[in-house]
Image: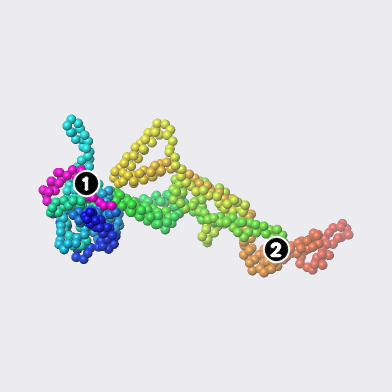
């Protein structure tokens, strides 16, 4: 009963202290590791250890971390720093990136760390044994029958001497380089033999970046860097430039997301991959170092696509909202105080009508493969108003009675399996399926099945995808509406300073007449119109500017001979 109480107290103590600064090394605490190997003992263990013994784990306690063990009334626990803890410093007690090591964990660095609490004033030492093994099934003949049993194979045992002084020692236990996943059993022994309960089991697979780079000199380094990074980026950059130019010629522009959106998206995706798939990513870069160069070339491609454009015209579509109004003379009229606008990018059509494009990755890819959102009513663009000094290239006035400024549906993709017509199609589909299965199996074996299934899903989507065209429709205003609209805008600007209707009338006359004679003619026409409205009769519009009485009474004379009307003398 007393022993259980002591154990529980020790477990509670380590849990509390491990959450704070208690994990820091106490002043004067030292720990040393010596790889002193007893060859006879190691050989004996490698020959005699069974799978059952290797799988035997130490006792863990409820409400305590999985790696805590209590042996001979002393607490031991095993921790490790995961490789995906970017910027961590393994072995530094002040670095809180460490994790308790559970039996189902996989260590991806080449060391684990043993911790304990040593309160005596003397320096003590223990021996750590680390056994690596694989598991396989073998057929074993027992008597008259053959049975299949699971056994441990390729057992290798390492021995390390660990010494520690009073305090909170942190003892590093080195692990072998394991390029493939291996099962590991670790236990402690002292002068009296194995310390009962001080055992741990886990898996170990070294992260790919811990492998030897295979370079011994600076020349080897420069040669490898040139072949795997520099040259692929140079030649790949030129190739990417050619590909992007053709894509822009076909699509008119890139996805149109801008640099900021791409930076945010790539940072987010890369961060998620590094955090969740660090080991797999490291293995990919080690197996295929050209992947890093391909990533850089892809960044070049994004920059090119977001920088250049072709055959574009930024078009402003304007639809005035017309409503009933009353003119200054009290008559019914039309006026507009509101309007709707849409800014669209119009690209020249390749042997067809122009197209409307909007930002988006998938619409861009659809345009690259031939899909278009052809503009219905594009004839109105021939009457577009050019805006050379504006942020837009042209202005199109839309019919006020149109339901919308522009009706647009983007390009897209449809997904369906290709139809199989005949034996040749069936053979082709079967061959593609076989190649795809082999590729997925290769990726799954080399990296991970998560990546393999992801690549397979993308490949299947690309195989079944078909670009679909969009639709764009505009109802341009008639040509005379545009002329009237522009005249209204021009006159409104020219008459802005007029204070009365007479001032506006005089200003209109000045704009209509380019000489004094034209002014007189205009005044004569307007005066004649006024007289006609007053007297209700027709007036000879060839009158010159004289007195109204003379013009009204002596407009003509009649001869005695033939009632022929002749002009009166001036």
* Relative horizontal placement of residue 431, taking residue 10 as reference (left or right): right
Residue drawn where x is 11% and y is 48% of the image = 40
Main secondary-structure element of the magenta-colored stretch: helix
Q: Nearer the viewer, residue 353 or 64?
A: 64
Q: Nearer the viewer, residue 412 or 194?
A: 194
Residue 177 percent location from the top left of the image: 21, 50
Q: Choose the circle earlier in sequence order: 2 or 1.
A: 1
Residue 310 percent location from the top left of the image: 46, 53
Q: Nearer the viewer, residue 194 or 61?
A: 61
Q: Secondary structure at mark 1?
A: loop
Assess disc 1: are there few (<14), some (14-19) or many (≥20) residues with their C-alpha within 10 Å of its C-alpha.
some
For disc 2, the marked residue is 328
Q: Is residue 412 above or below residue 551?
A: above
Residue drawn where x is 22% and y is 48% of the image = 57
- Do we see residue 408 in this rendering? yes
* Relative horizontal placement of residue 472, taking residue 261 as reference (left or right): right
Q: Is residue 570 above or below residue 458?
A: below
Residue 330 percent location from the top left of the image: 72, 61
Q: Secondary structure at mark 2?
A: loop
* Relative horizontal placement of residue 480, taking residue 137 as reference (left or right): right
- Do we see residue 112 in this rendering? no
Calculate the distance from the C-alpha at mark 2 to the C-alpha at mark 1. 102 Å
For disc 1, the marked residue is 56
The answer to whether residue 53 is magenta is yes
| Residue at the outermost front position | 1
Residue 276 percent location from the top left of the image: 33, 52
The answer to whether residue 73 is magenta is no
Numbered range of the magenta stretch: 38-62
């Amino acid at each position: 009963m007393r022993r259980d109480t002591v154990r529980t107290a020790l477990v509670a103590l380590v849990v509390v202290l491990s959450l704070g600064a208690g994990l820091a090394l106490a002043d004067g605490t030292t720990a040393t590791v010596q790889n002193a190997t007893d060859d006879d003992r190691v050989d004996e263990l490698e020959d005699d250890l069974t799978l059952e013994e290797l799988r035997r784990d130490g006792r863990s306690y409820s409400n305590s971390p999985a790696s805590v063990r209590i042996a001979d009334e002393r607490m031991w626990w095993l921790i490790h720093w995961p490789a995906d803890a970017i910027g961590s410093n393994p072995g530094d007690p002040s670095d809180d990136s460490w994790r308790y090591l559970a039996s189902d964990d996989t260590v991806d660095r080449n060391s684990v760390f043993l911790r304990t609490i040593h309160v005596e004033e003397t320096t003590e030492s223990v021996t750590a044994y680390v056994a690596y093994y694989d598991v396989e099934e073998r057929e074993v003949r027992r008597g008259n029958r053959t049975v299949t049993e699971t056994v441990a194979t390729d057992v290798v045992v390492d021995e390390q001497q660990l010494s520690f002084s009073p305090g909170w020692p942190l003892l590093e236990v080195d692990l072998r380089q394991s390029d493939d996943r291996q099962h590991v059993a670790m236990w402690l022994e002292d002068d009296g033999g194995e310390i009962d309960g001080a055992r741990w089991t886990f898996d170990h697979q070294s992260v790919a970046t811990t492998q030897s780079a295979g370079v011994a000199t600076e020349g080897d380094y420069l040669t490898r860097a040139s072949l795997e990074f520099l040259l692929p980026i140079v030649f790949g950059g030129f190739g990417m430039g050619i590909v992007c130019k053709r894509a822009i010629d076909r699509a008119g522009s890139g996805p149109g997301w801008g640099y900021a959106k791409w930076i945010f998206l790539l940072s987010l995706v890369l961060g998620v991959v590094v955090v969740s798939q660090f080991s797999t990513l490291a293995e990919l870069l080690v197996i295929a170092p050209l992947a890093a160069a391909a990533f850089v070339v892809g960044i070049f491609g994004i920059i090119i696509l977001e920088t250049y454009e072709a055959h574009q015209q930024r078009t402003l579509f304007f639809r005035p909202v017309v409503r009933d109004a009353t003119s200054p003379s009290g008559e019914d009229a039309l006026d507009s105080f509101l309007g709707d606008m849409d800014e669209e990018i119009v690209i020249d059509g390749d042997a067809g009508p122009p197209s409307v494009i909007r930002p988006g990755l998938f619409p861009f890819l659809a345009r690259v493969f031939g899909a278009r959102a052809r503009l219905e009513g594009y004839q109105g663009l021939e009457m577009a108003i050019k805006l050379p000094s504006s942020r837009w290239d042209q202005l199109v006035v839309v019919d006020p009675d149109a339901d919308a400024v522009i009706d647009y549906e983007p390009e897209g993709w449809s997904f369906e399996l290709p139809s199989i017509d005949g034996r040749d199609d069936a053979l082709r589909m079967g061959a593609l399926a076989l190649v795809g299965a082999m590729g997925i199996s290769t990726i799954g074996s080399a990296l991970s099945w998560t990546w393999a299934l992801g690549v397979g899903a993308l490949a299947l989507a690309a195989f079944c995808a078909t670009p679909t065209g969009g639709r764009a429709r505009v109802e341009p205003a008639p040509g005379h509406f545009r002329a009237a609209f522009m005249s209204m805008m021009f006159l409104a600007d020219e008459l802005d300073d007029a204070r009365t209707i007479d001032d506006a009338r005089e200003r209109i006359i000045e704009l209509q007449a380019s000489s004094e004679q034209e002014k007189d003619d205009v005044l004569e026409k307007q005066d004649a119109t006024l007289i006609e409205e007053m007297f209700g009769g027709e007036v000879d519009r060839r009158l010159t500017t004289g007195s109204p009485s003379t013009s009204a009474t002596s407009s003509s004379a009649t001869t005695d001979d033939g009632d022929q009307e002749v002009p009166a003398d001036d």
